[in-house]
Image (cartoon, rainbow, N blue to C red):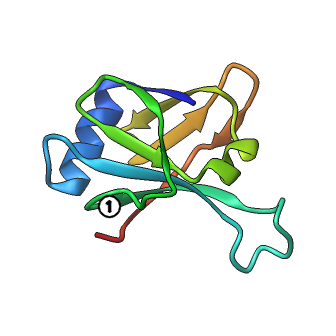
Amino acid sequence: MNIHFSERAAQRLQQLAQSEQPKLQLMYDNEGCGCAVNGVPLLAIVEKAAEQYATAEVSPDCLSVYYFPQHAIYFENEMRIDYNPDTNALKLSSAQQIYTHDLRVKNIG
């Protein structure tokens, strides 16, 4: 999995994490969504990744992103995260689709 963060997105996530090199976990949250294929992506700010998580290739390299390998089926291999300051929202997209215009960020330490 490869994720490119725009400069604005990287800066926003550094602000939210209060860290120059935040560790993030890309998750597919299907809790309360009815079934496993109905869910929403989210980024969690974490202290460290759990052992069973894989590491995504990320640019710029000031961010670290981990993901649960079984959740990789919900995402494409090449994705982009951008930040829109007008809406104060992160957008997760790929060349084929927009996953969300308002990517949730949750601090789970």
Q: As drawn, is 24 to the left or to the right of 81?
A: left
Res 12 seen here = yes
* Secondary structure category for the residue under label 1: strand
Q: As drawn, is 78 to the left or to the right of 103?
A: right
Mark 1 lies on residue:
46
The answer to whether 26 is drawn above or below residue 3 in the figure is: below
- Asked whether 5 or 76 is in front, the reply is 76
Q: As drawn, is 35 to the left or to the right of 15?
A: right
Number of marks in the image? 1
- Considering the image in quadrants, where does the N terminus appear? top right
Position in image of residue 99 (x %, y %): 67, 42
Position in image of residue 45 (x %, y %): 33, 59
Residue in the image at 73% along x and 62% along y: 39
The answer to whether 59 is drawn above or below residue 33 in the figure is: above
Label 1, residues with CA under 10 Å away: few <14, some 14-19, many ≥20: some
Residue in the image at 40% along x and 42% along y: 65
Residue farthest to the bottom?
Answer: 32
Figure quadrant of residue 93: top right
Residue in the image at 13% along x and 41% along y: 20
Res 87 seen here = no
- Considering the image in quadrants, where does the C terminus appear? bottom left
Q: Amino acid at mark 1?
A: Val
Position in image of residue 80 (x %, y %): 52, 27
The answer to whether 12 is drawn above or below residue 105 in the figure is: above
Residue in the image at 14% along x and 49% along y: 19
Residue farthest to the front?
Answer: 51
Position in image of residue 27 (x %, y %): 56, 56
